[in-house]
Amino acid sequence: MIEPARLLAVAFAGADLLFEVDRQGTVLFATGAIKGFSDGSELTGQPAAELFWESERARFTIIARGLSAGERVGPLTMTLVSGDKATLSMCYLAQNNRISCALARRGNRAVISGIDAETGLVDRGTFLSAAGEKIGGESAMALVNVANLQEVCARLSPDDAASLMAAIGTNLNTMKGGVAARVSATGFGVVTENINTAGELADRIQNPARARGIGNFEMEQVLLSLKGRNLTPEQNILALRHVIERFAEGKHKSLPGADLAQIFETMMDETVARAQHFCATVAEGSFDLVFEPIVELKTGAVAHYEALTRFRSGHSPADTIRFAEDLELADSFDLALIMKAFDLLEETDSAGVSIAINISARSISDPSSFSLLSALLLRRAALAKRVLIEVTETVELPDLAAADRAIQTLRRMGYRVGIDDFGAGAATLQYLHGLTVDFVKVDGGLIDKLGKSPREDALVRSVLSSCKELGVETIAEWIDSPEKFKRCSTFGFQFGQGRHFGAALKALPRKSNPVKRHHLGG
């Protein structure tokens, strides 16, 4: 018989903290220690989710509730309340109805710097990483947009323009205790130890121009404190990026107030509050699903229904999902969506009805996220023949080969997998040759242009031709009129969806209902 002490020693060889939780996530037993907690025993009776940053607690809760008997997940990368990175492994032991967890610290990921050739300043990504590390202290950030920088440089000789940009870079790189960056063609930023030093940014950009007799730059400056916000360091960086992009797009101009720093702070606070609300929505499952019919164009019969999310906050679903992707929260939402959709399939008398669910490309391409996704889908594989998975994305998949391996894993389980919003964002024809999928859903923006643009018509014909050769089914989005239906039928689409086929249903149809057919004429 193996001694309990020896078992503990083996476990601690790969973990700093061992604990058990019930199905609600309450700690029943804990031993060991990890940064931020002096004694594991102090955790007993407390929610284990409180070990982690607030924005990651929903993820832990969803995993704990979703595990089935004997199932294991991990190691997963998590962020502790201390800000440290840790790996989490979990296993549900049915004998005692407990989930065993092992948590181990890990080092922070190194930041690889990119350098701007003209100024010698670091790039935007490194700058945002530096800002994220400083959040919570007395540090500050300054951002300056030099509206006429390119115009000024165009008036100079190439050598003089190069000298000016190099001088600006040197001036910024010598700011005391700061990390300075070129964040865009005309934008500069600095993160410093205090707000007074950050306030020097505008002058340090202006001085080289004055010294050369060029005159004053036209500048717009934002100065703000990097006070703590209740997100992980990575999410703080992403929140900053989200706000900076909104600022660059001029969306700050719609906010009241004349002080740019105050407006920027307001935007940041709104972003953080929205992120926290989204995490709570995911953890509680407080969103609804409606079901839009996907119709076979030749017969008018409903092939399946797409499960569309409706958030109770009133925010646009597309805008909310894009926001979640920007802050890398979409993978947690994917898990919550799967659980809700499959529960509905199991609970309602709708045998034979199939649904499509949307999954973020991040959940497919990130190994940690995919391990959770695939484990949950494997557990529900009995329903696989009734579920289609639409892979959605706003950025290009970084590794098509790895993404295809993930997709084939799901297809082997019995799920049909397709590409959503094809022709929008990053989804291109190379995806048809790099990914083996069952269907392609062509973006409504292209459907709107059918018959109006020879270029777009040629693109759609190319997509349909490639799909036919590869045996991939095609679905047209946004069919909201008889005219669009006729164009899509003429072009050769097999299926379609949109208002032309009726409003989305608030509940799945019962199995006793006959297959609905839609009138396809004008």
Image (spheres, rainbow, N blue to C red):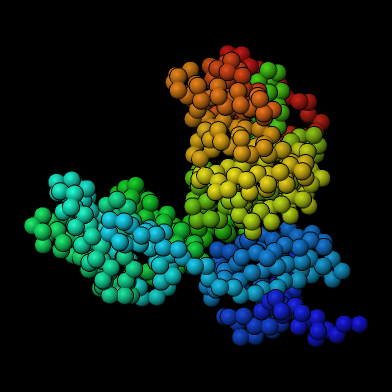
The answer, for residue 189, to whether it is visible in the render is no
Q: Residue at x 55, y 28 (%)?
A: 478
Q: Position of residue 444 (x, y in %)?
A: 52, 30
Depth check, front residue: 253 or 122: 122
Q: Name the residue located 55 percent from the left edge and 33 percent from the top edge.
A: 429
User: How far across and down, in percent of the image, does residue 281 sit?
Assistant: 58, 55
Q: What residue is at 18 percent from the left and 57 percent from the top?
A: 164
Instruction: Looking at this view, name the residue that lies furthest to the front.
Output: 159
Rendered location of residue 259, percent (x, y): 25, 59
Locate residue 507 relative to residue 498 in the image: left or right. Answer: right
Q: Residue 141: name its quadrant.
A: bottom left
x, y (%) of residue 487? 55, 17
Judge by depth and name the residue closer to the eye, 47 or 413. 413
Q: Is residue 130 above or below residue 459?
A: below
Side of 33 where 396 appears, left or right: left
The C terminus - image quarter: top right
Q: Is residue 198 above or below residue 153?
A: below
Please say if 220 is above or below 486: below
